[in-house]
Structures are given as C-alpha cells and as structure tokens.
C-alpha cells in the first residue's frame, strides 16, 4: 500500500492523507471522498504509513500537473495566503505532453526607428517595461515580438486587463497570426475552452490572448509573456487567492525562463521604479490635443455643452467619462442630510430610472425609489453625483438630432454587445458615447474630437495613497482617446486644474515626484498587508480584528498603520473590520498573515483597493 498527501482542489483545507494500491506520480489528479462527497485532489507527496486509518483513492484521472506547476502553486499558496488546493485550482491541468510544432510566420509590420530601438531594448532584457504614450505604437512592437517567439518554436501569452479589450485586439492578432491565436477569458463556453486546450496540446496554437486566467493554461514551451495596460487594477483578483497576474507574470518569467514585457502609457510607480524601462514618446499618427478646464459644480455646464456642440458641428465624435454608472450615485435628504443606504451594506444606493429602482452595486439588493427620507420622513429628497444614465438622458434631450450611447456595465453585458457598440462608434453611427472606466480601456477610437471628463475630483479625494496616481493615469488614458488621428480637445471638470496642468503632459515627471512622496511610507518602498474580518455580528467581527492587532504586536518588523471598521463597514449583511500593516520585508508580513490564518481573517498582500 502507498500513502500520499493530497491537496484538495478549490478547498481551503490543508493536504490530507489517502492510500492507494498502486504507485502514483507526483502531480497526478485523483478522485477521493471527503465527508461522503467525491472531490478532486492532487498528489503532492508520498508519505510514511500514518497511525490512523486512511480512505482509499478511488480513481486516477488522465490529467496532471507537471513539477513546475506544483512549484508555482506552492509559491502562490505561501505568498497569497491560501491553501495549496486553492492555488492549484487556478491552473488548467495538462492532459498529455504537448506536441512541438515549429511553423515559420512573417507578418506585414515595419517598425519605425524609435520602435526598433524599443524592440532591441526589450530583446536585451529578460524583464522590461515599455512606457509608451497612447498611440506611440506599442501594439506593433508586441506583434513583432510574437512573430519572433513563434518562429523560435515557442509560445506566447498576451495578457489584457478585461474581456472588453479583446474584440479589436482579436482582429489584429487574427489578421497577423490566423489560427495560431486563441482568445481566452471567463465568458467563452466550456466547449470552446475544450477546443482551445486540445489545439494547444496538438501544438496548433502558439499565442494565447486573454484576461488574467490565461496565465494558468498548460503551455509547455512558453517563451514570452506580454502584460498590456500593466497599470490596470483588474489584474488583481478580488477573491482568494488574491493574486496579481502582473506580479505572477514576472515570477513565472523568472521560474520558467521566459521573457516578460509590461506595457502602458501610464505605468504604475512600482514597475517604473523597479523594472528596466524604455520610454517611447509621441503618437504614431501625427496628432495634437488641446486641454481645457471647467471648474464648475459636478454636472453638465454651459461650457461643456458649447464644446460638445462645436465638436459635433465639425462632424467629430465625443466621449464623456464619469466615475459613476446608473442615474445618480446617491439619494440624499435635504432636511437631515442622510443618504438612502442599502439595508445589507453600508453604502448609498444607486438610482436606476429605467428600473424605477434603487440598486446596491455591492450586493445587488434592489428596492423601489422612496417618496420620503427613510430616516426623518421629509419629502425633500434629491439625487447627488450624476451617473452615466442621467448624463446620457440629458445629452439626448439637449442634442436631440444626435445619437447618444451609454457605455458601462449596465449597458454592456456581453462581448457581442461590446463589439456591436464599438463597431457602431467606429462607423460613426454614434455621435456621443457616455461611459465609465470602460472608455479608458485601450479601445481605438479614430473619430473622437472631444473627450469630456467629469467627476475626477471625487476620485482625487479618495482615501487612498494611490489616488493621485490612479486619477492622473485615468485622465491621461481617456484624454489619449481624443485626436488619435488629427486634432483633439479634452475638457476636464475639476477644481484641481493646477495638478493636472503640472503633470498631464509629463507623466514621467509625476512618477519621479511621487517616488519622493512615497519614500519610507508606501510601496514601492514598503510592502503592505490588509487583514479583513467579516461576520453577521458586529461585535464578533470587531473582536477578531482586535485579536489580530494583539498578535501583530509580536512581530517587531511589522508596523500596524491602523485598524478598525472598514471603509465600507457592511457588505451583504456582514460587518467588516480591517487592519492595515506595512513592513520593509514581505517575509515579516507573510509570517503575520499565516499566524492569524486560523482566525479565518482574509489576507490581502499588496492590496490595491481599500474599500
């Protein structure tokens, strides 16, 4: 009889011991029973016969994880404070050793002198950052790198932050690489996923483009990982394991010996500080842009409607950005000042006129719009902070002869809908597009003459040490959508125009100045850890975080920045508390995180969100 430690896939449990009549290789995927339920697990170690009775492994699957995957999963479990089973379940297992196909490809792209310099710089470094202005031609460099990788008989992963980026990029990739490319993300069907995996194993696919899950596919001959829009926060998982795909790409490069390239027009401070950087300036198309400011109250102003009218008269398209979807973010009582909050979350409900309802964007609880304030009964309740639906409606009324399109998660729920809207916009069937951060996501708009940016002061004033960096990056990304070919204007509604005037034309200078501000306090100089407790009883959640704070005192290298109620103190009827810690050493933070693991607090190392 043989005895093995089995890591149960998707389970938070530590590995359990099972027996088998036959010898099994490490990494084999097996079926076992746990509490009378059949579940899958992975053989991670052969062990001595234990002193207790063991269940027998019921079935050995044809799939497996190679040693390299086991090694990467062990790192993920340790660094992101999860079980080995949870870490392994991120990876798609291998069915058999893949075939090695070496087809030669030639693509019709000629790089400019500057692009060539960037290409040579990337070739000379195992890890690099391409800091290229919007429209400077980063994608062409990626394509040439993919061509070289495929011609060396290797595979490439092209990471994109969201499904939303794939339609246009898919067309470009298919144009250059045909059937050698596959697109991978959570919304593709199980059948399609099977076809892709089988084509991968047969060596028919050399380039996988997709969201962060594409990083975990069974690629045996990986030669290159490109992380596009590397600043984007959607590379960070919001659930356990709370990994960051960008950071893991860098680790995979190191462990698997493949080249890693990060690319962005607004790179994060951490990447800029730590990674060899090539600065690619200027737009590929000759373009100019003119930036204007409006320091009025949040909402549509006379200056704004004038600028929109001017752009429309010149047969140009307009994009309007604001941070809030729906109609209005909050319903506030004029008498007592209270917001109408979700009963299960401590956040203001968002107004959705089309549903005649208030909806919570955290737990999806929905209720009818109240006639009076629930706190004091006053009938004078008003909506504050405009959202996309409200702005779309007002613009449709004001510019009734023009087509206005809402572009946010309420409106765009499928890839098909996204492709339709982008295609209509590029064919000039839409005159004004009103959207949230989806507008900034690397889409190529060729006819935009004006980009209007609303509500950035709310982002700039957020309680987050990265708020300046995030807001400036977002404004630059949206501003970069105007005048991709020719002259473009940008109108920013803000009472902080001095900040934008100083840095909008020089993001590199902002990064250098911000490094001075962060030194000794925040990343990239310090490592951070967020520990969170949640419970249906307020006092239980509080007691947990108090206990964590006590334990933290035993870690001299760890500084507790603060602890108490979370920014959003309640979500889905659970009260939330948090502790924020920092240290020069990630090892010290991880020791603390693992020390409090049994208290069932959630650990988030290198947190990006503090809500």
Image (tube, rainbow, N blue to C red):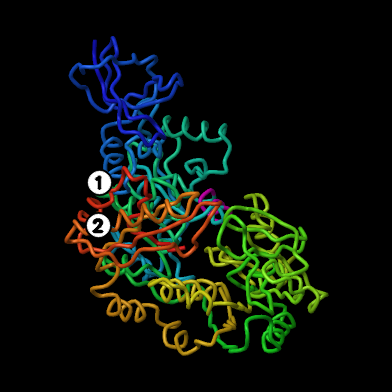
> Which circle's residue, 1 or 2, is located before the other in the chain?
1
Q: What is the quadrant of the N terminus in the image?
A: top left
26 shown above or below 312: above
Q: Say left or right for 567 vs 353.
A: left
Q: Which residue, given by chain and number where applicable, does mark 2 sit on?
A: 552
* Residue 406 numbered mark, or none: none
The answer to whether residue 391 is above or below residue 416 is below
Other residues around mark 1 within 10 Å, as few (<14) / some (14–19) / many (≥20): few
**Residue 410 among magenta residues:** no
State the SS at label 1.
loop
Q: Nearer the viewer, mark 1 or mark 2?
A: 2
Task: Determine the image quadrant of residue 353.
Answer: bottom right
In the displayed image of the protein, which residue is found farthest to the right?
A: 401
State the residue at coordinates (60%, 72%).
322
- Of 137 and 39, nearer the camera is 39
| Residue 23 percent coordinates (x, y) | 25, 14
- Magenta residues, as a range? 167-174
Give the left or right position of residue 366, taking residue 561 as reference.
right
Is 365 or 443 nearer to us in this picture?
365
Picture coordinates of residue 560 (x, y %)? 27, 64
x%, y% of residue 149?
A: 35, 48
Q: Main secondary structure of the magenta part?
A: helix
What distance separates the C-alpha of mark 1 from that of mark 2? Answer: 37 Å
**What residue lies at 75% left-to-right and 63% top-to-bottom?**
369
Q: Which residue is mark 1?
A: 257
- At horizontal 53% and vertical 87% (from top left) the residue drawn is 495
């Amino acid at each position: 009889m043989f005895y093995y430690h089995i890591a149960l896939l998707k389970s938070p449990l530590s590995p359990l011991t099972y027996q088998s009549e036959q010898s099994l290789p490490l990494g084999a995927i097996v079926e076992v029973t746990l509490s009378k339920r059949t579940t899958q697990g992975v053989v991670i170690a052969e062990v001595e016969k234990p002193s207790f009775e063991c269940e027998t492994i019921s079935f050995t699957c044809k799939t497996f994880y190679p040693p390299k995957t086991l090694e990467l999963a062990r790192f993920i479990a340790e660094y992101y404070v999860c079980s080995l089973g949870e870490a392994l379940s991120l990876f798609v297992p291998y069915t058999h050793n893949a075939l090695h196909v070496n087809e030669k490809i030639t693509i019709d792209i000629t790089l400019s002198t500057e692009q060539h310099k960037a290409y040579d710089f990337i070739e000379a470094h195992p890890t690099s950052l391409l800091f290229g202005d919007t429209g400077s031609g980063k994608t062409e460099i990626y394509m040439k790198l993919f061509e070289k990788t495929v011609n060396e008989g290797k595979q490439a992963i092209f990471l994109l932050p969201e499904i939303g980026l794939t339609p246009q990029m898919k067309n470009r990739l298919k144009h250059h690489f045909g059937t050698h490319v596959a697109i991978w993300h959570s919304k593709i069907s199980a059948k399609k996923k099977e076809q892709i995996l089988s084509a991968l194993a047969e060596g028919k696919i050399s380039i996988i483009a997709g969201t962060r899950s594409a990083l975990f596919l069974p690629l045996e001959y990986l030669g290159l990982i490109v992380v596009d829009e590397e600043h984007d926060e959607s590379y960070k998982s919001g659930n356990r394991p709370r990994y960051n795909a960008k950071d893991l790409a860098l680790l995979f490069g190191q462990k698997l010996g493949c080249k890693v390239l990060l690319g962005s027009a607004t790179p994060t401070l951490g990447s800029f500080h730590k990674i060899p950087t090539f600065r690619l300036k200027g737009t590929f198309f000759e373009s100019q842009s003119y930036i204007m400011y409006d320091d009025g109250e949040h909402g549509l102003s006379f200056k704004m409607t004038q600028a929109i009218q001017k752009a429309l008269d010149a047969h140009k398209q307009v994009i309007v950005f604001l941070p809030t979807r729906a109609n209005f973010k909050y319903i506030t009582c004029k008498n007592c000042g209270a917001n109408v909050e979700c009963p299960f979350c401590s956040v203001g409900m968002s107004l959705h006129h089309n549903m005649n309802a208030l909806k919570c964007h955290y737990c999806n609880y929905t209720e009818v719009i109240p006639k009076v304030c629930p706190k004091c009964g006053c009938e004078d309740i008003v909506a504050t902070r405009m959202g996309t639906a409200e702005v779309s409606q007002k613009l449709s009324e004001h510019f009734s002869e023009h087509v206005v399109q809402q572009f946010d998660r309420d409106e765009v729920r499928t890839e098909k809908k996204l492709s339709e809207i982008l295609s209509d916009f590029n064919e000039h069937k839409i005159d004004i597009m009103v959207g949230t951060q989806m507008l900034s996501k690397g889409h190529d708009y060729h006819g935009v003459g004006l980009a209007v940016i609303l509500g950035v002061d709310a982002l700039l004033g957020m309680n987050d040490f990265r708020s300046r960096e995030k807001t400036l990056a977002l404004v630059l990304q949206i501003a970069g959508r105007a005048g991709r070919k020719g002259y473009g204007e940008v109108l920013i509604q803000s009472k902080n125009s001095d900040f934008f005037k100083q840095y909008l034309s020089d993001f590199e200078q902002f990064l250098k100045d911000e490094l001075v501000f962060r030194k000794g306090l925040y990343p990239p100089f310090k490592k951070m850890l967020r520990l969170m407790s949640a419970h249906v009883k307020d006092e239980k959640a509080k007691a947990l975080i108090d206990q964590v704070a006590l334990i933290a005192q035993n870690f001299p290298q760890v500084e507790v920045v603060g602890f108490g109620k979370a920014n959003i103190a309640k979500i889905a009827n659970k009260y939330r508390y948090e502790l924020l810690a920092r240290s020069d050493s990630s090892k010290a933070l991880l020791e603390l995180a693992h020390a409090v693991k049994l208290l069932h607090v959630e650990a988030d190392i290198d947190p990006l969100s503090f809500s």
